[in-house]
Amino acid sequence: MRRTLRILLPVFLLGAVAVVLSACGGDDNDTSTTSKALPGNAVARVGEVPITKTEFDHWMNVAAASTAAQSGQSGELAKVPDAPDFTACVAARKKAAPKPAKGEPTPTDAQFKQQCQQTYDQLRQTVATFLITSQWIEQEAAKRNIVVSDKQVAEDLEKLKKQQFPKEADYQKFLKQQGMTNDDVLFQQKLTTLRTKLQTDVTKGKDKVTDEQISAYYDKNKARFATPETRDVRIILTKTEAQAQEAKQALEDGGTWKEVAKKYSTDDATKDAGGLLQGIAEGQQEKALDDAIFGASKGEIGGPVKTQFGWYVYEVEKITPADQQTLEQAKDTIKQILVSEQQQKALTDFEKNWEKSFKAQTLCRSGYTVDQCQNAPKTTETTPSTVAQPNTTANGG
């Protein structure tokens, strides 16, 4: 069975730092001033830290291999498409393409080339976003004096490896499939830990809730802490009123619900259980039956009641009264709700300013711009959270 270790896969492929990307390519908003502001070997710069073309190309290879591994592809299809001509990519796609169904046209080289271009652009956008956002996280952590030691990262990785890979050879096979090195995995593990620590720092002190806040929330949301009355009821459903009368008479003559329901009821869900429906709340049944059930006294055989499904005979067997939790009973639940709301607001407010601040410090070369670049094309799309929702679980497959 093919193994996956989600925490170790490139985070940009798994949504841990997922973002909505703007179109990549063309001249973007690049100018001669932009080019001069970037070192010759850089595709982008965050503050004073360049993202080099060598680094970018490495992660392009990782992204291509990882994507191919997840979809079961190999060979040329697991490589970065050979832009701009895509000769090798087109040949590989033609070879791997299934034979068209009878009457369907064979894809043209131009169509295959378009697919290669789309894959290349997507990989390029994804990698640029990953590397830029990674810098944002590292630089924000440094500003807040948040430190993750190499020892901690290595120990965390070893724990994950033991959970997912019985043997070291399995881990090495995984690295090869994903086109990664152990250093790549350590880097992503470090990012994951930094995201977690950033969350903790941003939400520090937001777990304090006063009794006044709890009381106000309870008064405003009492219905959330109430349980409605429920009833256990036995029913028999028949096609005609005459059959329903026969069933009712049989019950009144001393027949058991188990016997009578099995003989007369057409309701497959309850006929073999003596017609029993448990925990019915008002408003859950067809209106005529619902009104009859909740207007009846316990132990009273009622009906027949006509509904769109047929005729019902019923008996209320048990009534569980409505219940309203007291403020004291609901206190712990309300505290959890309020803490969660406060922490989420803190994260949302932080990220709004965080993204704006770092975007102003991020400059990208033409052909590498994404929404996180100050010189990116204007877009109306928004950037989802990159700190509030870190991927912190390993999954085996």
Image (tube, helix red, strand yellow):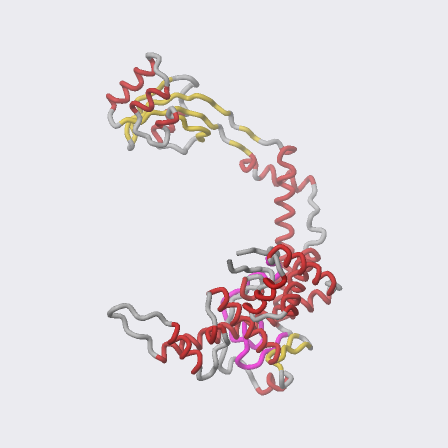
Counting from the top left corner in percent of width and height, residue 126 is at 53, 70
Judged from this view, the residue extending furthest toward the top is: 253
Q: Residue at x 60, y 72 (%)?
A: 131
Image check: 140 left or right of 271? right
Main SS of residues in magenta: loop
Q: Residue at x 36, y 77 (%)?
A: 111
Image check: 274 left or right of 326? left
Query: Residue 226 in magenta?
Result: no
Counting from the top left corner in percent of width and height, residue 265 is at 31, 26
Counting from the top left corner in percent of width and height, residue 362 is at 62, 75
Q: Nearer the viewer, residue 194 or 316?
A: 194
Q: Nearer the viewer, residue 5 or 38?
A: 5
Q: Is residue 149 visible?
A: yes
Image check: 251 left or right of 351? left
Counting from the top left corner in percent of width and height, residue 116 is at 43, 76
Q: Magenta stretch? A: 362-391
When the figure is inspected, residue 2 is found, relative to residue 330, above or below; the finding is below
